[in-house]
Image (cartoon, helix red, strand yellow):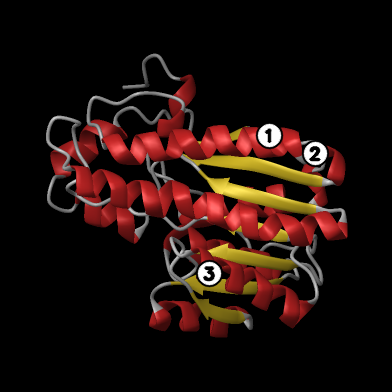
Amino acid sequence: MTEPQTASPPVCRRLVDRTAVVTGAGSGIGLATARRLASEGAHVVCADIDAAAGEAAAEEVRGLFVRVDVTDGEQVEALFRTAHETYGSVDVAFNNAGISPPEDDSILTTPLDAWRRVQEVNLTSVYLCCKAALPYMRSQGRGSIINTASFVAVMGAATSQISYTASKGGVLAMSRELGVQFAREGIRVNALCPGPVNTPLLKELFAKDPERAARRLVHVPVGRFAEPEEIAAAVAFLASDDSSFVNAAEFLVDGGIAGAYVTPL
């Protein structure tokens, strides 16, 4: 199996004095991204429903913690209002919070309440966060919104998580439309599409079914799952002016999965 290269501490300082709001900042991709954005000079607002994890993340990056249920419109509005009142701008919104519960499986077995819960957390929350962030960005005449979709938004799987897949397809379509709608106001909106990432969510998902994990891993051309820091590096790029002409894109960071017909033995 291919091992990830050891990443050196980033030397880029592309986000000095910019304000970045990160949902799901307490763990996984969100935590790695909070660290990366802070290292590049951003003021990071760490949002999470888990107060202990969110506070720890904010303390580590010398940012601000806001506890938020991302499915609650009033709480989401308060999150972005707090970011603006504290730091004076909302420059980056990384709308990343999401769930993948075990009961979300085949369409034949997934109950309606599980379907609805995943849609609320994974898709409706992105709608609410974009809606709350955009007025600040429009008044500034600039901003970068990065919404976490997934490689499953662009391809199908026989090992289905039907509501998760559908929610991420919705995030991708919504991001594309918002990117087009607000482009001439200096606002870029992109959908980040990670492949499988070595996070607590993925570990929990596969802990009871290593065969299912192996079945997925065999399709990754590089032969491993991504590390959260690799996804965070992509977020930092999309947040920065280095990606100034990247807009309304499905930004795949998937180790080549979406380009593969067969993978190396």
Which disc number belongs to residue 183?
A: 2
Query: Which image quarter holds the C terminus?
Result: top left
- Residue tagged by mark 3? 74
Please report the residue visible at 59 percent of the width from the left and 74 percent of the height from the top. 78
Q: Quadrant of residue 99?
A: bottom left
User: Percent position (x, y) of residue 85?
Assistant: 74, 80
Label at residue 248: 1
In the image, 224 versus 38, the foreground residue is 38
> Taking 117 as reference, is 194 left or right?
right
State which quadrant residue 17 falls in: bottom right
> Which kind of residue does numbered mark 2 sit on?
Ala
Q: Position of residue 68 (x, y in %)?
A: 47, 72
Q: Indicate whether 145 appears above or below 160.
A: below
Which amino acid, mark 1?
Ala
Residue count near mark 2 (Cα–Cα under 10 Å), binned few <14, some 14–19, many ≥20: some
**Callout 2: SS:** helix
Q: Is residue 247 visible?
A: no
Q: How many numbered circles are shown?
A: 3
Give the mark nearer the N terminus: 2 vs 3.
Answer: 3
Discs 2, 1 touching: Cβ within 8 Å: yes
- Which mark is in front, 2 or 3? 3
